[in-house]
Amino acid sequence: MEYIKLAIVTDDKAYGQALSRALLIGNRGFDLSLFSCGAFCRRWREAGDLFAGEYDLILWDQEGVEQLAGGRIVRLSEHMSEAGGSKGRRVLYKYSPAGPMVGEIFRFYEELTGRRPPRARPSGVHVFVLASWQGGAGCTSLCMSLGQELIRSWRRRVLYLSLEGIESTAAYMEVPAGMRGAGEFLYHLEADGSKGVPFLEGYLVRSEAGAEAFAPSDGGNPLSLATGEEMGRLLAALMSSGRFDCILIDAGTAAGEAAREALASADRIFLVSSAEEPEREKRYRAFLKYGTERDCSDRIIRVRNRWSGEEGREDGREDGGEVGTVRISSARKSGTALITEGRFAKDIHRMAELCYNKS
């Protein structure tokens, strides 16, 4: 899911904060930064166009600036009559309601980049992705355990999505005969898009804890081969369905378009490993940055799975404010159910806390 990165430049701090809140209410696809005019200009002088180029659009509460930054500046005007857009000139009435202002920002963004604006993301729906550079690191069992904890302790309505080539869903959930899977849902979503989101009943199976998932396909997982656009439409449909508060995505070692779209959409990315491999982790972090076209560092939480030692159990802090490694004890299963008790239960509880809090 694509984000529009906006800078709001104004010396009226209260107005800037109110505008930021209004835009995020209007659409959660914005990535916002707030600057005073002086602070923005200083950063621009120091770093040059590399700094200004970080933003898709710059909403600037000052006159005479429209031609700067390659035409990415949108001037915020006190006068409604000045609002509109033409070649090299983009102006917003600064006191417009959030809805019309979001619509104009989308229009300017599409004119400037040729890309469609991101789909609206409903407030209160979160996406968490578990991914790894190691095969067999345990993303699936952690994803299922995390979902169980979010249901039990946080009262979340959880959907589990697998991007594995061969799904493991049936190892954790009973799958009745005749259930349709994600591939058929995606087909009907594409074919009947004008009619809205297809009814999810008939596609979803449920774990003992109450997490839901698409019934696994008999062959390969169709989501592992989905395009980024298809994955974006699927996530948008699921988030707008009103059925879920939380979507847990088991990306594993997937690195295709669907995985990149999921990682770009994530509120938190849990990097799972069962052993320290600094060089491979470094390469995977580079993939996250360049594959998703976003700096993911502020959303990453490292997870060391199947931890058996006792030393250094406490979470540390790393440069940039990133949460340090969360150490998870080994999971146990009974049939399709995961046993969450003792040290493992406490570790998963900590992981669930970090979904919504950075400390």
Image: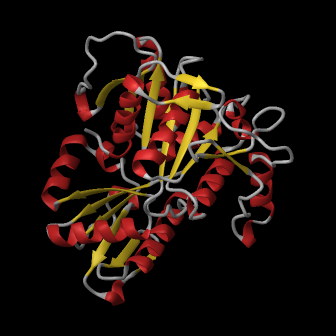
**Compared with residue 26, is residue 289 higher up or lower down, i.e. above or below?**
above
Quadrant in the picture for residue 32: bottom left
In this image, 65 relative to 281: left or right?
Answer: left
Closer to the camera, 198 or 232?
198
Image quadrant in which the C terminus is located: top left
Which residue is farthest bottom?
81
* Residue positioned 79% across, 59% down in the render: 188
Closer to the camera, 184 or 320?
184
In this image, 81 relative to 102: left or right?
Answer: left
Closer to the camera, 224 or 216?
216
* Residue positioned 24% across, 34% down in the render: 321
Query: Is residue 61 in view from this perspective?
Result: no
**Compared with residue 328, is residue 226 higher up or lower down, i.e. above or below?**
below
Task: Estimate the x, y position of residue 316 in percent, counting from the top left.
Answer: 24, 24
Query: Is residue 11 in view from this perspective?
Result: yes
* Residue positioned 51% across, 34% down in the render: 145
In this image, 209 relative to 72: left or right?
Answer: right
Quadrant in the picture for residue 81: bottom left
Q: How is the image coloured?
A: secondary structure
Task: Estimate the x, y position of residue 227 in percent, counting from the top left.
Answer: 69, 44
